[in-house]
Amino acid sequence: MTPALHRARTWSVERLRKGWALARRHPVRTALLPPALLLLYLLVLIPFTPSISDIRKAKSEVPSVVMSADGVVLAEFKRLNRQWVPLTRIAPSTIDALIATEDHRFYQHHGIDVRRTGAAVLNTLRGKRQGGSTLTQQLARNLYPEEIGRSVSLTRKAKEAITALKIEAVYSKDEILETYLNTVPFLYNAFGIEMAARTYFDKSADKLEVLESATLVGMLKGTSYYNPVLNPERARERRNIVLAQMAKHGKLTPARAKQLAARPLRLEFERQPEPVGIAPHVAQQVRKWLIAWADREDYDIHSDGLVVRTTIDTRLQKAANQAVARQVKQLQDVADRSLKKGEERQLLQAGFLAIDPRGGQVKAWVGSPDYAQEQFDHVNQARRQPGSTFKPFVYGAAFMQGMSPEDTFIDEPVAVRQRGGGVWSPRDSTPPTHEPMTLRDGLVQSRNSITAQLVQRVGPERVAELAYSLGVRESKLEAVASLALGTSPVTLREMVTAYGTLANSGRYLGDPQLIVTVEDRAGRTLVLFTKNEPVQAMPKPHALRLVDVMRGVIDEGTGTAIRTRYGIQADVAGKTGTTQDNTDGWFVLMHPEMVAGAWVGFNDNSATMGDSWGQGARSALPIVGDFFVQALRLRAIDARAEFEIPRPRPKPVEIPRRDPLGEMVNDLLTRFLRMVQ
C-alpha cells in the first residue's frame, strides 16, 4: 500500500469513528445518520478506486511496439489478444443490439441508472437476483477487475458505481461504447468485438449482420453458458431475446425480428492465433528487457505507446527464417524415414544468429524453426557442447604464446591422464598418419589428436581465459584437457560473439546489440544505446593469423561446401563442429562485415542425428551457406571486403597458346569423320 493510500484509509476510518460517537451523544439526530453514513462510506471507498488520471490513461492506451532497423513492426505488446477498432468501424447493428439489451437508457444516465438500480435492489430483497449495472459500470469491471473485484457485495457495487461516475466524467458516450466493445471478452482468447467477429464469423466487425451482432451481444450475459460453439441451442435462444429487445426499443420492426428469429445459428468459427511476426524470439528478448526497464522507470509496456527500435534487418531476418525452415524440413524428413519401429518421433530444432562484427549489432535471430511449436530460444537459452567450433580458441591461445601455424605435431594417438583419475583418449574419424602435421592443417582438417596435444602444451586454463575474453562469458568452462574439443556447454550467442571478436581483429564489443533506442509515443528518446568501446581481447596480429588459418577450413577443410555448393567466393573463414554421436551440429562463418552461426540438434541431448547428415558440415552449414548467399545477393554485405591480412590467391591457370594450323586440321578431320558416318 502506498503512503498516500494508507493516509487516506486512516483518515476515512477516523471519520467513521467520529460519526458513530456523534450518533451515541445525540440520539435525536440518529434519523439523519443513514444518508450521512452512506455518503461517508462512499467517501471512504474513493481512494480504493481507479484515479481520474488512470482512467484518462486507459482511454488513450497504446501498446508498445518493436521496430526493425528498416522501419517494420516486429511485435506489439498488447495486454490482450485484441485489435482496437474505432466506433465508426463497428457495425451499427452491434451498437443497437448492445444498447437495447444491456442498457437502453444509456444516453439518459451519467453512469448509474437510478431506476434500474432501485428495481434490482427490490428484486434482490425479494429473493430474485437481478443485475442493475449500466454499460459504464460493466466497463468499469472490465477495465479494473482487481481494483473493483468480482464478489457479490455492497462494497464491490459501490466501487463499481464510483468508478462508473469517474468514467462518465472523462469519457464521452461514444468513447464509452468504443472502449466497452474493444475490451469485452468473448472466449477462445478473443478480446473485443473485432477479434470476436473474426473468431465466430470470419469477418471484420464492420461487416457483422444483425443476426451475427445479436449472437455476439447475447454472449455477454454469460460467455460460457451461451457459447455458440458448444451450446448452439442456448446461444440461439439468447440471440432471439436480443432480437426481441431490439424490436421493443425500436431498432427492428416486430415482423423483421420474428423473421430473423426463425433462422438457424450459422457460424464460421476459427480460433485467431496471436500474430508472432517474423522475429518472435527477438520480440521475446526485447520484452524481457523492456519489462524490467519499464518497472524501474514507471512505464507500462501495454499502454504507454513506447517504441523500441532494434538492429534487426528484416531482409536478413526473412532470409534466416527461410534458411532455417528449409534445412530443418529436409533433415526432419530424413530423421522420420530413419525411425525404427516403436521409436518416438522427435522434432529437430535449430538456432541461428547473425551479427555485424564491426559494431556488434544483431541482424537476424532465429531461436527455433517454428515459434508456434517451440518457444524455447536455441540462440540465447540452450547450452550445448560446441564440439570442434571451440578448437580455434586452443590455436589462438597457442599463437598468443608464440607458436606458429607452421609448427608441427605428430598425428598419433593421444592419452591424457586427467586430474580426477582416468585417461582421456580422443579419436579422429580417420586413422592417424603418424606423420608430422602443422597446426594450420590440424585446425583446417579438425584433427582431434593435434588439438589434444596442443592443449597440453598451452594449458586448458589459457584456453578458457581466451574464450572468456572473446565473448564466452556466461557459460561455465571446465579448465580440463577435453575443453579443447568443446565439451563445456555454451550458447550459440556466445559462440557467434566470440567469432565476431575474431572477425573484428580481436576487438571485443560486449554482448551483441539488439536495441538501439526506446522512444515515448511523442517520439522523444528515453534511452539511447551507443556503440560500446572496443576492448582488445586478443592481440590483433594473433587474431588475424587465426582468421587466416580458418580461411583454410573453407578453402580446403571441413567447410568447403561454402565454396563448392554455395559458390561463395568472398573472403570468409569459419569452423564446423560435431559432438559425440552426432548429438549437435554447429557451423560459424566469418566475413569482415557479417558473422553468422547455426546449431542443429534435438532438445533431448541424448538423441542423436544420423551419421550421414548429423555432422555440422551437413546439418548446420547449409543454413549459414543459404543465408550468406542471400545476404550477398541483397548487397547487405560487400563481396569485395577482406580481412586485414592478405589471403592466399589461387594459382593462375595457364592458358595454352593458340595453334591456328592445328585447329584448322582438327576441324577438317572432324568434318571428314561426320561425312564418313
Image (tube, rainbow, N blue to C red):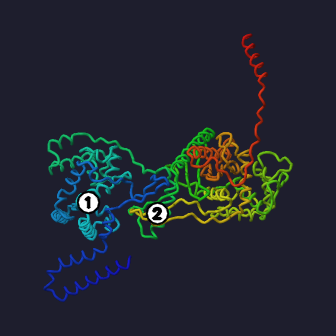
Horizontal and vertical percent position of residue 491: 62, 57
Q: Find the residue positioned furthest to the top.
A: 676
Nearest to viewer (mark 2 / mark 1): 2
User: From where the camera sits, is residue 577 visible?
Assistant: no
Nearer the observer, 94 or 522: 522
Q: Which mark is residue 638?
A: none
Q: Which residue is mark 1?
A: 176
Element assignment for label 1: helix
Element assignment for label 2: strand
Q: Amino acid at mark 2?
A: Val
Nearer the observer, 63 or 79: 63
Identify the residue at horizontal 17%, vertical 65% (top origin). Answer: 114
User: From where the camera sits, is residue 22 visible?
Assistant: yes
Horizontal side of residue 322 vs 420, given as left or right: left
Horizontal and vertical percent position of residue 635: 57, 46
Residue 490 figure quarter:
bottom right
Nearer the observer, 101 or 623: 623
Identify the residue at horizontal 18%, vertical 63% (top origin). Answer: 109
Task: Name the image quarter holding the C terminus.
Answer: top right
Horizontal side of residue 392 vs 352, given as left or right: right
Is residue 470 depicted above or below 608 in this figure? below
Q: Which residue is mark 2?
A: 518
Nearer the observer, 661 or 517: 661
Horizontal side of residue 111 vs 424, given as left or right: left
Circle count: 2
Horizontal and vertical percent position of residue 584: 65, 50
Residue 409 figure quarter:
bottom right
Horizontal and vertical percent position of residue 386: 67, 54
Q: Amino acid at mark 1?
A: Ile
Is residue 159 depicted above or below 629 in this figure? below
Identify the residue at horizontal 65%, vertical 47% (top origin). Answer: 608
**Number of other residues with Cα within 10 Å of mark 2, as a class: few under 14, some 14 to 19, many 20 or more:** many
